[in-house]
Image (tube, rainbow, N blue to C red):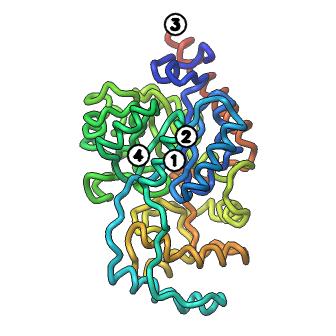
Amino acid sequence: MTPQWPHNSFTKRFHLDFPLLLAPMAGFTTPELVSSISCAGGLGSLGAAHMSPKELRSAIEALRLKTHKPFIVNLYAASPTAASEQSIKAQVALNPYRKKLGLPGRFECLRPAYTFEDQLDVLIEEKIPIFSFSLGCISKSQRQRLEKAGIAVFGTATQLKEVKHLNQLRVDAIILQGEEAGGPRSTFLTPCREGLVSLLDLIPQAKEVSSLPLIAAGGIIHAKQIAAALILGADAVQMGTAFAICAESGAPACFKEAFKKYMAKPTVLTEAYNGRLSRVIQTDFLKTLEKLPNAGFPDQIHILSDLQTKCLSLPSIDFTPLFAGEGFSQASDRSALEIFYDLAQCTSLIFKELRQTKSS
């Protein structure tokens, strides 16, 4: 690590040059993107929530071919409820849109054949370096299985009571998801709207009750925000939106184009795309989608899948969420390495100036 950056136990344990983590961003974090961040001295994270066990194993193998550095694999730990009549109602309500797109009608809610436990089995068999979970919480027995396999575990919290819960679970680090964060909310002890706490408030609150390493996440996209989070007490910073449309991102081309097109728009919180409160860029089609019945999480993801796939082939972002944190207008389409090293250098200069000011 460069002398300008703060040293801490987290960076030493995981052999990081910089306390910068890539957010998982399920579907967008390719092995190329993840390995770029890890090789640059940060910590890359693979968003594997929507991967089958076979796809997950292949992605891990691809990652290990690209880097010998530590990396994270992230899964959603939410427990799905039984399919309800609302799920069927939401599915059928989309059939007029399917007809317009030349798709067959659907009258039942189909879920993947694999479970979270199946995915977790792969990670344990592969003995990945680090596992992170979000949108829920793992059990004590699952924590013990991961610990026995020698896998470090990061949990995600959005409020103080969740920080305390993860403390008791003895995770290795806590990711603090501020309300500014893009994508789905990771609240797991209360309704999601009760977990909308600003990162500015959440970091010092968590610092008061936990001695575990804290990773700040939520709308962080430039060097001043990185420095501020570390000064407030975070041990590291996790960024997703900053890399959402970078060259190595797995986001479809039309997603990247729309991301730029809507940069003057605000971000909003909605359940329309996945049945769970999520921060997205406000688009013209979102208002239409919000008027339709919602199947709830995770069924809303599955009932939109065929429509998303078809629209992206047109190409169109209808039915596809533009997940983004606040400040997304500063996101860049440069390579991940360019973005990473630019952030690292600018943050280093900030800390250097702070030290010079303090000593003068």
Inspect this view and state whether residue 225 appears: no
**Location of mark 2 (residue):** 126
Amino acid of disc 2: Glu
User: Against 30, is 173 above or below?
Assistant: above
Residue at image mark 4: 178
Q: Please name which of the two marks, 2 or 3, marks the residue nearer to the observer.
A: 2
Q: CA distance from mark 3 to mark 4?
A: 33 Å
Q: Residues within 10 Å of mark 2 (few under 14, many from 20)?
A: some
> Mark 3 and 1 residues: CB-CB less than 8 Å, in contact?
no
Q: Which residue is mark 1?
A: 122
Residues packed near mark 4 inside 10 Å, few (<14), some (14 to 19) or many (20 plus): many
Q: CA distance from mark 1 to mark 2?
A: 6 Å
Farthest residue to the front: give it.
125
Residue type of the residue flagged with mark 3? Ser
Q: Looking at the image, which is closer to me, 88 or 341?
A: 88
**In the rendered image, which quarter contains the N terminus?**
top right
Q: Position of residue 352 (x, y in %)?
A: 59, 17
> What amino acid is at disc 1?
Val
Secondary structure at numbered mark 4: loop
Q: Secondary structure at mark 1?
A: helix
Question: Does the CB distance between marks 4 and 2 fall below 8 Å?
Answer: no
Which of the two discs, 3 and 1, sits closer to the camera? Answer: 1
Whichever of labels 3 and 4 marks the residue nearer the N terminus, that label is 4
Q: In this rendering, is residue 97 above or below 156?
A: below
Callout 1–callout 2 Cβ contact below 8 Å: yes
The tag on residue 35 is none
**Between disc 4 and disc 1, whose residue precedes?**
1
From mark 2 to mark 3, how far is it between C-alphas?
Answer: 49 Å
Tell me the tag on residue 359. 3
Q: Earlier in the sequence, mark 2 or mark 3?
A: 2
**Residue at horizontal 35%, vertical 52%?**
136
Element on which disc 2 rests: helix
